[in-house]
Image: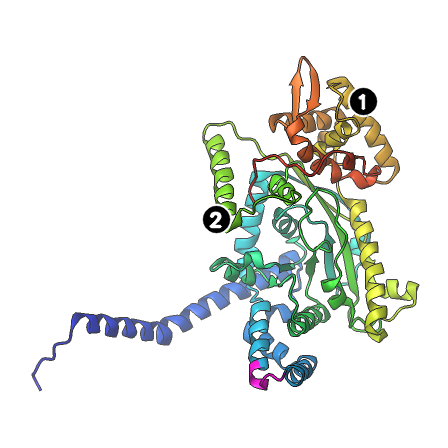
């Protein structure tokens, strides 16, 4: 009984680790779950009282439950059986693939992380980099949206900052769910993004089974009233102008819509614009047919170089924020009213007819988005140069041309952000930003676009070109400057 037993050190270490793991599972994990659940419930209670945000039960449902509900959806199971029969695959393999797709798509929303960490981080980053402004909002139209409606913010896509900016500005009203591309599926980052309520999308998947799973998830979230944010363009603008819309996610949202259902589906057009887009030069590089792709390592090095240069400027007191970032919220589009006006029933149409109707809806939404894109100082001054890029202009001529543009666009209903309500100051801000970045050069009191940066000038002019006939398209856009900003 008193005999001692000796074991090798490596075995003792393994046993100690297993014992610690068991203690964590049996004692620490339940306590930590209770602690965080209590914090989450406190946040939800605060949202219900102070901010009057009602989180849909679907958004608060445990992820495993949502995955199980999606996996056992009748339409998905029918697609599984059809796929197994057509392709001759074992049924168990097809079901395993569906389970993998469901786990890849379904988020795991955490209210505490979204409204404590996420909101603070979005606000801090946005205000650090930009002078953030809410330019215009159709307050009467937004207030008239029925409380139980499913709200979808549809917006132009200029920068990856769009996610941060809109989430920050809308956080006191809704908790948005984004569709995020595969770029964000990085270990560590994807768990955080999922906890913010985002779901991952394979943009160019050719697997019909995957599209069925994604379609059913989007339909379930929409029917359950989950507020969402959608970029109809499907990706970042490459030349600065609005891109033609893509209709996949939009189709998934409306294909099951019934006007006599419990919830209305309301699209709110959102326009965003920046005095400086972090990815401007990187996006312009995509226009070069013969460009050599940088790859992941090259993109990371470019981003680190960009961040290091700006950090150095901060430490030496030479850094300035990247100008103004402005967001406009347009008039809501109720699907109940829309289908009544057009006499269409999306749920009753065959696939071909429905796609035509979805395309018409997509074009209408893009027109509404374009109408609320803010005119910011850099875009205004860039347009003034774009009308005659070969000519050197004095400051007085620039201001005269810009004021003429302002009058023309205001007559067309454009929403123009004028800092301090001072046109002279706004034009000066835009000119200073372009000069500091060497997009415009000054010699003897005359300003002329730098030849090597004409594509960058056109990029910013194109953001508002739809208000004035797209004159910036006359500038060359196929030769971007070799320097690249953060991707």
Residue drawn where x is 58% and y is 81% of the image: 95
Question: Which range is magenta?
Answer: 88-93
In the rendered image, which quarter contains the N terminus? bottom left
Does the stretch in magenta take in 91?
yes
Q: Element at badge 1?
A: helix
Whole-angstrom CA distance, mark 1 to mark 2, is 46 Å
Where does label 1 land, which residue? 400
Where does label 2 land, which residue? 297
Q: Is residue 151 left or right of residue 165?
A: right
Judging depth in this view, the residue of 2 and 458 nearest the camera is 458
Residue drawn where x is 73% and y is 56% of the image: 232
Residue drawn where x is 56% and y is 47% of the image: 293
Q: Element at badge 2?
A: helix
Q: Is residue 411 left or right of residue 37?
A: right
The outermost residue toward the left is: 2
Q: Circles 1 and 2: CB distance less than 8 Å?
A: no
Residue drawn where x is 52% and y is 54% of the image: 117
- Seen in the picture, residue 351 relative to 118 is either above or below; the reply is below
Say which label, 1 or 2, has the lower sequence index: 2
């Amino acid at each position: 009984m008193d005999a001692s037993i000796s074991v090798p050190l490596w075995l003792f270490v393994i046993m100690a680790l297993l014992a610690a793991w068991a203690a964590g599972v049996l004692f620490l994990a339940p306590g930590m779950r209770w602690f965080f659940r209590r914090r989450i419930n406190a946040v939800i209670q605060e949202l219900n009282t102070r901010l009057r945000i009602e989180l849909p039960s679907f958004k608060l449902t445990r992820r495993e439950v949502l995955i199980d509900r999606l996996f056992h959806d009748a339409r998905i199971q029918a697609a599984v059986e059809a796929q197994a029969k057509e392709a001759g695959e074992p049924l168990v393999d097809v079901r395993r693939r569906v389970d993998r797709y469901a786990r890849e798509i379904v988020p795991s929303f955490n209210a505490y992380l979204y409204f404590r960490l996420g909101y603070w981080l979005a606000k801090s980053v946005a205000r650090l980099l930009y002078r953030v402004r809410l330019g215009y909002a159709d307050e009467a139209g937004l207030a008239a949206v029925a409380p139980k409606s499913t709200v979808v913010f549809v917006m132009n896509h200029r920068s990856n900052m769009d996610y941060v900016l809109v989430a920050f500005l809308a956080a006191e009203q809704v908790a948005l769910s984004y569709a995020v591309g595969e770029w964000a599926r990085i270990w560590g980052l994807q768990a955080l993004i999922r906890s913010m309520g985002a779901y991952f999308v394979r943009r160019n998947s050719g697997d019909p089974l995957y599209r069925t799973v994604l379609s059913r998830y989007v339909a379930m979230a929409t029917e359950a009233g989950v507020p969402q944010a959608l970029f109809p363009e499907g990706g970042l603008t490459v030349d600065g102008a609005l891109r033609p819309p893509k209709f996949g996610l939009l189709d998934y949202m409306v294909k099951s819509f019934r006007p006599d259902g419990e919830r209305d589906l309301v699209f709110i057009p959102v326009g965003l614009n920046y005095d400086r887009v972090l990815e401007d030069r990187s996006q312009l590089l995509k226009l070069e047919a013969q460009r050599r792709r940088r790859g992941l390592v090259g993109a990371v090095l470019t981003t680190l170089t960009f961040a290091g240069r700006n950090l150095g400027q901060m430490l030496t007191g030479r850094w300035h924020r990247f100008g103004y970032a402005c967001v406009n919220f347009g008039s809501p589009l109720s699907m109940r009213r829309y289908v009544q006006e057009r006499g269409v029933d999306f749920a009753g149409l065959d696939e071909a007819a429905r796609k035509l109707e979805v395309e018409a809806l997509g074009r209408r939404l893009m027109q509404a988005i374009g109408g609320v894109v803010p005119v910011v100082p850099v875009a205004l001054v860039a347009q003034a140069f774009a009308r005659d890029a070969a000519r050197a202009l004095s400051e007085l001529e620039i201001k005269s041309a810009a004021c003429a543009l302002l009058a023309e666009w205001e007559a067309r209903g454009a929403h123009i952000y004028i800092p301090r309500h001072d046109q002279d100051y706004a034009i000066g801000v835009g000119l200073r930003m372009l000069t500091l970045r060497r997009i415009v050069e000054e010699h003897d009191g005359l300003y002329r676009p730098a030849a090597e940066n004409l594509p960058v000038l056109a990029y910013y002019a194109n953001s508002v070109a739809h208000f004035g006939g797209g004159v910036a398209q006359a500038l060359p856009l196929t030769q971007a400057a070799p320097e690249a900003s953060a991707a």
